[in-house]
Image (cartoon, grey):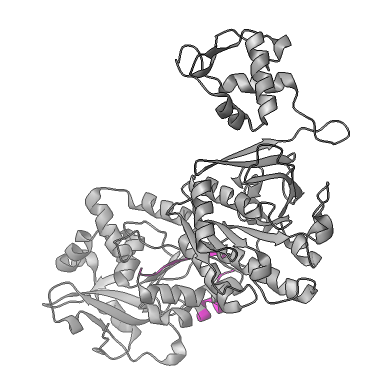
Amino acid sequence: MRVESVHPPASETWATFERLSANERVLAYVRERGLYSDATETEARATPGQSPRLALALRSLSGKVCDVQFRAVEEVPHDKRFMRLGNVPDSVGPLVFGQLGTVEELVLIEGMSDFLAALGPFALPYGSVLGLPGATCAQKMVEALVECMPRSLRTVVLAFDNDLAGNKAAEDVIPLLTNAGLSVKRVCPPPPHKDLADWAVALLRTGEDAPTAWRDALATAPRSRSWLVPATDFVAEAPSEVRFLIKDVLPVGALALVQGSPGVGKTWLTLHYASLVTKQDKRVILVEQEGSPAALSKRLRLIGVVHPLLSIAHGQPIRLDDPAWVEQLARACQQQEAALLILDPLADLHSGDENDTQDMTRLTAALKHIRRAAPDCTILLLHHTVKGAWSAVTARREHSRGSSVLVGAADVQISLTQLDPGRTKPAAHFLLELVKARDFQAPPPMKFTLLVQEGRGEVVVQPVEADAEGTEREETEEELDTRALSKIPTDASGDTISLEELRQRLHVGKEKAQGTVQRLIAAGHVMRVPNRGLRRTGKTMSAQEGDQP
């Protein structure tokens, strides 16, 4: 915007301009754009003459009129549309539209029209809005603001233009404001609107309520917090309960450590979690350092997670002790709004010593940096256990390899222990235990089984019941019979199921499957259909026969 000096600098010049209500042409210009309000009469005037202009007072932060900016209301050469009185001494400091009141929330606007839109259509209170002549003066204005801000001020809302200059200005001033103990929100007009004035015109045309639209945008605006927050604000804004990405296992935004011996199934588990997350229409980033592309591709197909919401970095030289890579990961999680970041395995993602406390402290600091950039992104870090724990029956926190710094930083620690696959020969079969759950009650241990048939995988996760001594309890025959009966088609459906298919659905050996079928046939609950398979007869199991309430 070109600025020309057209008048000698004098604050008294402002008093010579006409009120808007006295100048029909300027008043019509303001009304057509929905910018008129009671506050407009205070801050806007009209220049007299044949070519009147809209005039807005530019004040120091103390409220004194030090300059005036004009805008043409009729067609004029482009470089004559905006003008200023000019010649303001540097000692006056940065100038703004509006006056700073004793407020808790202050909105910073860019430009004349946006300032009037804030007071008019969006109905923001006078004294709670300051307008900047341009984005380039934002940093100097904020530096001056933090020196004289009212003690009541708690939050600053940045409503600069949604363009490169506006976004750059926001990035520059956010640290200044948060370092001053203020909370900061960034409100951008929804696309395709470039600024508040443009947005206000669109709302006026559609008949939507501008104040409601502003409140909705403010409620969802990203917030940058001061390092020091009043307890009342902290409690009011904190979630009332733990939010889970994976129910009762992975909280939103948690750092989770998955540990186990080589080949136990850590990658299978995390791919299963990735599948569950993409089914929630949320994004997942997988950093995979092990195996060939062909092997990973096969696993993705088997687990059913070939999905556009899953992004993969395979075999890249990513290092968590390299600040440049950490920044790239943080930016990727932030820009993609990823709900889950999988890092597999830790050993291939750093060049430090796992047993060195300082090296692991730097690594956990990198993970915390990613969390700060994307606070709702859960990080899943795969790690090996010590060799002495490979054959352990009971999982423990200390089985994690290397320094205890990593375990201390983790919110969740998941330990995997290999189980005897028996005759089913699944692709993965292990016991999953949460040996650490910082903010919630850990669930009982679970059995994870992945069976593969005809190029497709089926994952079954079942809780493991324990007796009074804490050892795993075997499923009784009655319980198995009840479970089997629920998987056999009814007589009314006309379908059947083969013994082998039933065995696979039950995840048991052939002998157990045959035994349960024989008991169900003997009790009259199941019949064999020649050359077809098994079908239910319709007879209901009694409680004595193992029916569960």
User: From the viewer's perspective, is residue 229 above or below residue 174?
Assistant: above
Q: Which residue is pictured at 31% across the width and 72% down the height?
A: 112
Residue 81 falls inside the magenta stretch = no
Residue 185 in view here: no
- In front: 319, or 133? 319
- Residue 358 x/y as whole percent: 77, 76
Q: In the displayed structure, does residue 1 sit left or right of residue 183? A: left
Q: In the displayed structure, does residue 399 sit left or right of residue 74? A: right
Q: Which residue is pictured at 79% across the width and 55% down the height?
A: 390
- In front: 76, or 542? 542
Residue 32 position by quadrant: bottom left
Q: In the rendered picture of this protein, how many numbered marks are placed on residues?
A: 0
- Residue 408 x/y as whole percent: 77, 61
Residue 412 in view here: yes
Q: Which residue is pictured at 33% across the width and 87% down the height?
A: 10
Which residue occupies the extreme right position in the image? 469
- In front: 51, or 383? 383
Q: In the displayed structure, does residue 387 sit left or right of residue 279? A: right
- Residue 88 x/y as whole percent: 37, 89
User: From the viewer's perspective, is residue 16 above or below residue 88?
Assistant: above
Residue 295 position by quadrant: bottom right
Q: Which residue is pictured at 47% across the width and 77% down the height?
A: 61
Which residue range is magenta in the image?
Answer: 143-162
- In front: 220, or 323? 323
